[in-house]
Image (cartoon, rainbow, N blue to C red):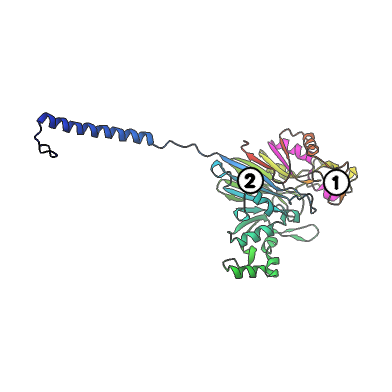
Amino acid sequence: MDSRTNVPISRREALSAVGGVNVRRFSLAIALVVGMWVAAPVPMAEAAPCLIVTLTGTQSGPSVFNGQAGAGTLVRYGDDRNDCAAMKLQFDTGRGTNMRLPQLGLSPDQLHAIFFTHMHGDHTEGLADIMMLRWYFKGPKIDIVCSADALSARGFTNSCRKYAMHIGDAFLQSGEIAERRSEDNARLAGGPADLTNVITFEPKDEPQVVWSSGDVKVSAIRSTHTAGHASYRVDTPAGSVVIGGDAGNDVLAPPRASSTSDQVEKLAKGVDIIVHSAFHPVMGPEHGSGFPPLSYYRQSLASDLGAMAKRVGAKHLMLTHLGPSLGAVIHNRWKVPGGPLTEADYRKAVEAGGFTGNTIVGTDLATLRLPVK
């Protein structure tokens, strides 16, 4: 009986109807299985790791020229999914660092750690700006990594620790901290210093790991410039970079084999990128610039940096903290013999040292990515 019409149906029709249902069910089952096979997830290729090194400031010494920011290097690491920005490390914070970071699409509260090579103002003056803005935004605490208090040969102490601990004193004394807290008492009462987590180490003649996070490892080594000066190396799966700071040779004047640091050379063995302050030989005493010999001899010359980069097998050399700056007629207070220098002048000096890799003559925001696209 057909339940829809109350009309009797034959046995054959009944079997045909039942068979049709079974066929349809079977066909549906096959379709589901096939659909599941087609929709099965295809393994995705892993995002490639990448490393980006940016010169946030290239000015040499306490003077200012042509709007250049003070010395600083930003190292970013990640992969293609996050535009190489999972980890952001700032090495030195010369004046103007706060202005350069936003040009890279970054805010100071996005930095994960700050490292100092030494306590000269052209490498440190921007820290107050960074920490004050970080405090204003109620950002998290940040690691500040530097050498322990160092006694100089003349009896005074260079102290990164004290500098960081007192970074907000001017704002406390001016009343700004109290005023800003009256508007939002969630801001910390001690000001910017309350956001610092100072990590110090004793610089040694051999590399030592001073900071790490995930795949990123930062090592440091003692180097000569001022008491407590340190140079750093960052190792990641995407590549490695050495930040030499203002390092020079332990022998403070000729005769010597090189103006560069033996310790930095040890740190840089097999590195991909070297970032280093560089002086041009034209500023030497023999050329009559009047630049103080003591200051000149504690710097690394571009020609010697080229030779060192060749010896350690580096692929890229980024010159920064240039002395003299590109286009400058006067370096600090001293005339540049023969007139302003160009990028070609620095490249020629590097090539005289035998380096045939990629040389970047530093300008603010000059950037290098690994792997190179």
Label 2: how many Cα within 10 Å (few below 14, some 14–19, many 20+): many
Q: CA distance from mark 1 to mark 2?
A: 35 Å
Report if residue 293 lies within the magenta region: yes
Question: Where's residue 161, x and y in %?
Answer: 68, 60
As drawn, the residue found furthest toward the top would be 12
Circle 2 residue: 234
Report the side of 237 relative to 127 (left or right). Answer: left
Report the side of 46 relative to 119 (left or right). Answer: left
Question: Where's residue 20, x and y in %?
Answer: 20, 31
Question: Where's residue 262, x and y in %?
Answer: 74, 43
Q: Which residues are magenta?
A: 291-319
Quadrant where the N terminus sits is top left
Quadrant where the C terminus sits is top right
Identify the residue at horizontal 77%, vertical 37% (top origin).
Answer: 347
Q: Nearer the viewer, residue 150 or 130?
A: 130
Circle 1 residue: 329
